[in-house]
Amino acid sequence: MRILHEFSYERPRTIDEALALLAKHGGSLSPLAGGTDLVVGMKMRGILQLTPDAGTPSARWPAARRVPAIQRPAVVMSLAELTGLRGIEIGADRVRFGPLATMSEIAAREDLAPAVMAVRDAAAIMGSPLIRNLGTIGGNIVNARPAADTAVALMCLDARLELASTGGRREVGIDSFFTGPGTSVRRADELLAAIEAPAGPGQGSAYLRLGNRRQLEIALVGAAAWLRLDPQTGDIAEARISLGAVAPTPVRAVAAAALLTGRKPNAESFALAAGEASAGVSPISDFRGSAAYRHELVKTLVERALETAARRAAGGGA
């Protein structure tokens, strides 16, 4: 039995060509960036030895509930030729990530401002070196997994996403992008064209996660923190906290972050916010960990992420 189903393959040379293909094929087309999620999803039916009329995997094998969703696009469109979607542009007050920037490329950028270091943290711990060399930040966002590392990191940075179609371009805040596990507000005819995050002075961010294994594991809990310090007093002028793997989508801990405004960036403040962040989520229990364990992880990881973000905001380096 063949592992991959039959499909058409397109390799546009320009973004306009790619958008035209998306407009033509809609939801039957899947863009291919690094392929670290898409190809696995396309192989999954063959790996589970399912025929098209065999029903859902979980109906035949309970363990299949743990695998990614099966994907059977009629058309696969490679983004390899679209050089305009590559690279990282560092400006005076913002950073623009091309959606085809790989995790390895992001992790290697030592010139990223402290304000956006959470993204580098996330990219550096994702998968294996092979996965990081292939996997892209755009793919990690568009796949819309609740535990997507860079999505959680970008959410605490208040990042903006640029979506392009033949009808024009629109901006969406990443906090309103995700609608459920594997789903988002991106339309079938749209392509993620850019990711932009503010990066001003006196700001610092950090991302931490914990899984059952040190490597090659999705997060049991992921936590990101961003802080802006008052240049005169050193107090916390503004804060954001985001969490992954504790809800159907990456989420912001709004109430927890609000507790930090005007407070000193110290252990007492961070413990207070971490406790509120834990109380504000309702994680599930599954084969990877209990809800109670995830609640404790939220406390620990938020506290540590805040400590690192504060140190970076104050100019303390990595």
Image (cartoon, rainbow, N blue to C red):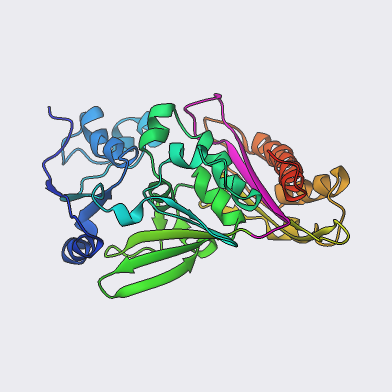
The spot of residue 162 in percent (x, y) is 41, 65
- Side (left or right) of 313 relative to 163: right
Taking the spot 45% from the left edge, 62% from the top edge, the residue there is 161
Asked whether residue 261 appears in the rendered view, the answer is yes
Front position in the image: 254 or 161: 161
Span shown in magenta: 200-227
Q: Quadrant of the C terminus?
A: top right
- Side (left or right) of 215 relative to 204: left
The spot of residue 202 in percent (x, y) is 73, 56
Residue 206 versus residue 256 in the image, above or below: above
The spot of residue 210 in percent (x, y) is 60, 32
- Side (left or right) of 113 relative to 1: right
Residue 35 versus residue 62 in the image, above or below: below
Q: Quadrant of the N terminus?
A: top left
Front position in the image: 68 or 94: 94
Q: Locate residue 122: give its quadrant.
A: top right
The spot of residue 185 in percent (x, y) is 40, 64
Taking the spot 85% from the left edge, 57% from the top edge, the residue there is 235
Taking the spot 25% from the left edge, 61% from the top edge, the residue there is 15
Q: Is residue 163 magenta?
A: no
